[in-house]
Amino acid sequence: MKPLLIVLSGGPSGWAPIGPNGETLLEYGVYDALRAGFERIVFIVPRDEEEHFREGVLNRMKDLKYELVLQDEDAQIPPDIAEKAREAGRTKPWGEVHALLCGAALITVPAFAVISANCFYGREAFETMWSYLGSPSITQQKLPTVKQGFIVLYPLEKIFPKKVSARDASDDPPQAPNTPSSAVILGICGVKDSYLAAMRKCTISSGDSFTDEISGEEIAPDALVSMGFWGFPRSILPALRKYFSDFIQDSANIPENECDLFDAADWILQSGLLRIRAIKAPGECFTAQTSDPETIPELIAEGVYPPSLWS
């Protein structure tokens, strides 16, 4: 049974047009996924964004076979916790893990990939993820025994349009400071023997250097980071439910808290529930906040993408 691709909508920032015919970031990801071999696509979107998503994205992909899951604020939430959260002021769903669990009933195959609509991962990342998720070691094992996951990683400096380094030891005269870019939430990853050893969520901005806005720490340009491209076995879903259950118990009175996959993955790692192989992707990568308007036209000129994705 072939792996499926789950696209977490990420909100309207990933639906802004970047292609010559209004194509969005997530459309280039879906296009790359289809070329790599994925055939089944599941979009998970907050219910209050459904109309915008259909009009701004799905209407262009009319021939695409897909399934749409609407993420409700109270879905998967016990009534007493939902009531407590509303009283505390929560008006939105509970984040990425919540979204994934809202679509869990559609995960009927041994393995699945997860991406964010806000990111451009590059064709090579999808090809490599497909080759791993579709391997017999994953698809032919009994589900409870599968303890292998995957994550796509990039050097931090590749994600930002202007590469900066506070450790540049060249003798060139000082250059004018780079214009600071929007802060981006990424997972800083420690890798040992090709496997993820630790993950820490950071909010990173760039100027003359890369800085974690949470801790104030300077991050090395060659640090390996995740933009949220995962490969999981279906057998990990009970662990994610357990993590999410504990999270909402602790966060019912904190309306801004979201249960994200970066923190969940680190908990999974430290609990010994899954080994996550690190895939270092060689291609282009950026987020909605760090995109360079020249990148997509250049890739079209090079023949990587057609001028119109869906015609």
Image (cartoon, rainbow, N blue to C red):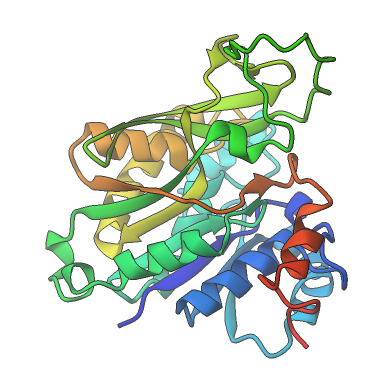
- Identify the image quadrant of the C terminus: bottom right
User: Would you say 156 lies left or right of 280 here?
Assistant: right
Q: Residue 122 or 109: which is nearer the viewer? A: 122
Q: Is residue 276 above or below residue 114?
A: above
Q: Is residue 87 above or below residue 79?
A: above
Q: Tell me which residue sits at (58%, 81%) in the image.
A: 66
Q: Position of residue 244 (x, y in %)?
A: 40, 43
User: Would you say 66 lies left or right of 296 here?
Assistant: left
Q: Tell me which residue sits at (66%, 33%) in the image.
A: 184
Q: Tell me which residue sits at (57%, 70%) in the image.
A: 32
Q: Is residue 108 above or below residue 205?
A: below
Choose top left, top right, bottom left or bottom right for residue 304. bottom right
Choose top left, top right, bottom left or bottom right for residue 1. bottom left
Q: Residue 245 or 297: which is nearer the viewer? A: 297
Q: Tell me which residue sits at (13%, 71%) in the image.
A: 142
Q: Residue 194 or 76: which is nearer the viewer? A: 194
**Numbered-mark total:** 0
Q: Residue 203 or 69: which is nearer the viewer? A: 203
Choose top left, top right, bottom left or bottom right for residue 82. top right
Res. 120 in view: yes
User: Would you say 227 lies left or right of 208 here?
Assistant: left
Q: Position of residue 286 (x, y in %)?
A: 66, 46
User: Would you say 99 lies left or right of 138 here?
Assistant: right
Res. 69 in view: no
Q: Position of residue 47 (x, y in %)?
A: 69, 62
